[in-house]
Amino acid sequence: MNAELRFPEELLLNEPDRRARLIREFYEQYNENKIGYGGWGCQHEEIKTAFYRRCLEANGHDERSNGLDVGCQGGVLIKFVRVIHWIGVDIDQRALQTAREAGILCREMDFTSSIGFRDDSFDAVMMTEVLEHLPYPSITVREVHRILKKKPGSTYVGSVPLDYHLHRRWKVFRGKRLSGEQTHVHHFSFRELDRLLSFYFEKVEYLPLSGTAARHPKLKLPYNLFVRDIAWAASSPKQNAGRWEVVRKNLI
């Protein structure tokens, strides 16, 4: 081969796991200004805890069931949800140390794309305020579906902020950013979230956490316009879900 056409292999940076390290360092730096990894009460934890617990029990789960908390941080939700036997994964080593000190089984894992567990490993997966931080939610939810046991009671619980309610739309109309949170790399509408979860699960239940629809539930306002934060409990993973269509229209 002509030397002039040779790819400059010597310029390549051969540093295994560099991607995971950079992401870990970013989140550790981001979390330095937080009150602590064991904080409680800032993101509707009490309401979500009761909702998750009720849905897990309704699907027949108890201490014999195994669950995975993806993005467990300091293990706050694990400690309060309980019901089943949980383990946790996170990319932030300082958060994991807090979780271990609280007696939670956990380990470091870069789950920004794949989730490193075998098929049909868990009865439940929890992902609270995590999905909006990940670049490809369709891959993440597919991975959750893969590691859940294909049983009617298998459950996926979680929560995200919704960024296309009327208040945020008005902000954009005035020339402001959709969200000021720099770690949010995906901005959900309720329609997108619902279509994604319904693609992989037979049953999906929602609980509005904030917004006009949460304050006035009797009005039955549309979630897509009147909910700011929402929790879900998806159960009955579909046996053959197929492949999510990457290009989807009318999701806003």
Image: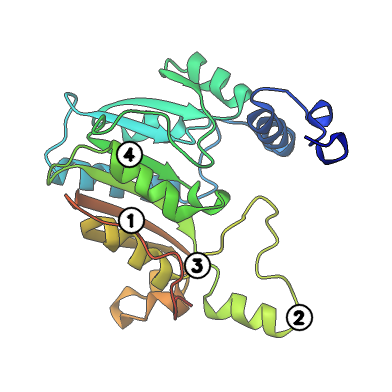
Nearest the viewer among 182 and 242 is 242
**Mark 3 vs mark 2: in front:** 2
Quarter-of-image position of residue 209: bottom left
**Numbered disc total:** 4
Residues at discs 1 and 4 in contact (Cβ within 8 Å): no
Crowdedness near tag 2: few (<14), some (14–19) or many (≥20) residues, C-alpha within 10 Å: few
Q: Residue at x 36, y 28 (%)?
A: 117
Q: How far apart are the two marked residues, 1 and 2, measured between alpha carbons?
A: 31 Å
> Residue 57 in the image: x percent, y percent?
17, 41
Residues at discs 3 and 2 in contact (Cβ within 8 Å): no
Nearest the viewer among 238 and 107 is 238
Q: Residue at x 66, y 64 (%)?
A: 179
Residue that mark 3 sits on: 228
Residue that mark 4 sits on: 125
Quarter-of-image position of residue 4: top right
**Between discs 2 and 4, the one toward the N terminus:** 4
Residue that mark 2 sits on: 175
Determine the secondary structure under disc 1.
strand
